[in-house]
Image: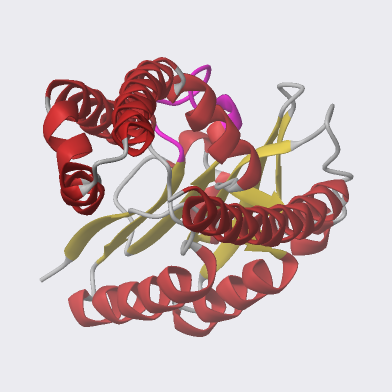
Amino acid sequence: MGAMIFHEFERGFCLTEEGLRRIQAIIKERIPRDCIVTYVVTRGDAFTYRTKEIDDVLDEVNDATRQVVALEVEAQPERVDREEGGAGEVSFRLMLVFRSARTSASYWEHAGCTLEIQGADRDAAYLMLSELKNYISSDVANLRRFDKSNVELFAAIIALVLLLTGVAVYILKPEFGAHVLAGAAQEALKSTDISEKLNYLISVEAKRRSLSGLAVVCVLAGVVAFGSSAVVSKTLGRFFPTDIFAWGKRKQKYDSDVELRGKLFWGLAVAFAVSIVAGVVVWRITI
């Protein structure tokens, strides 16, 4: 009994020279003797060609104008490969497709990696699937995708939380002020000094105004969070790219992006830590 298998990898891929050679080795080790491996390369300048040599693929300049946007790895009997269209029933056929997100809107509905295997030997087909799936999932298609809809949903949740926080602070600010200054209120009531009582009233009003300012900031931050989801999605795509053919010039750019991402991460972490410490110090001084 034969098998027809289709598998779509959920995560984004980063296909390097090492990864492509390893995939070639797995395929060649498992395919029948009468099968050959063929590569179909599509570039960003709309040029497409077929080759049986992996070095032809890896010798691509892969720069901005001639960037590799799709790669199909095919394996089937040589006699079928020579026929136009590859018509007819075959004993074995494998199609491993990598598609870049850069051109998904223009050429394909979805970017990513898919694997299709058709074989007369069911056990051999599933063994091939298992080996390729395990390797690609762990070493190639292992990049997290920042889907636009998920980013927009996250931004909407953050915006809603900030808006509700701002409204709650504004409505409950008298109670907040009274709670914060509870000790000072007791001292003011016990004191016979008019100036101390006036200072207490001034402090209460200052606290309430600061809470009003906090409420406004929360509301504005919520509006900004909701309106900037598209920018955030694009920024995440810039610093966390997926579906990459990482050889030639594209590898240099990818390595540069990863290095920049690391520097920005640590810079933001340090800035966040400093702001927290500064906020705590100012809070302790002003209370």
Q: Quadrant of the N terminus?
A: bottom left
How are the colours assigned in the image? secondary structure
User: In the rendering, at what x and y percent does residue 31 appear?
Assistant: 45, 76
Residue 126 percent location from the top left of the image:
25, 76
Q: Nearer the viewer, residue 2 or 159?
A: 159
Question: In the rendered image, is residue 180 in sight?
Answer: yes
Q: How many marks?
A: 0
Q: Which region is colored magenta?
A: 102-111
Residue pictured at 53% horizontal, 66% vertical: 140
Could you tell whether 184 is left or right of 243 in the image?
Answer: left
* Vertical placement of residue 183 versus 222, above or below: below
Q: Quadrant of residue 272?
A: bottom right
Task: Let me know if residue 106 is in the magenta part.
Answer: yes
Relative to 175, 49 lies left or right: right
Q: Position of residue 49 (x, y in %)?
A: 72, 37
Q: Nearer the viewer, residue 39 or 113?
A: 113
- Residue depicted at 37% across the width and 71% down the height: 133
Q: Which residue lies at the image location 60% right of the left edge and 80% below the top edge?
A: 25
Asked if one can make out residue 149 in the rendered structure from this viewpoint, the answer is no
* Residue nearest the observer in this picture, 236 or 135: 236
Main secondary structure found in the magenta portion = loop
- Residue 26 in the image: state x and y as whole percent: 52, 80
* In the image, residue 1 lies in the stretch drawn in magenta: no
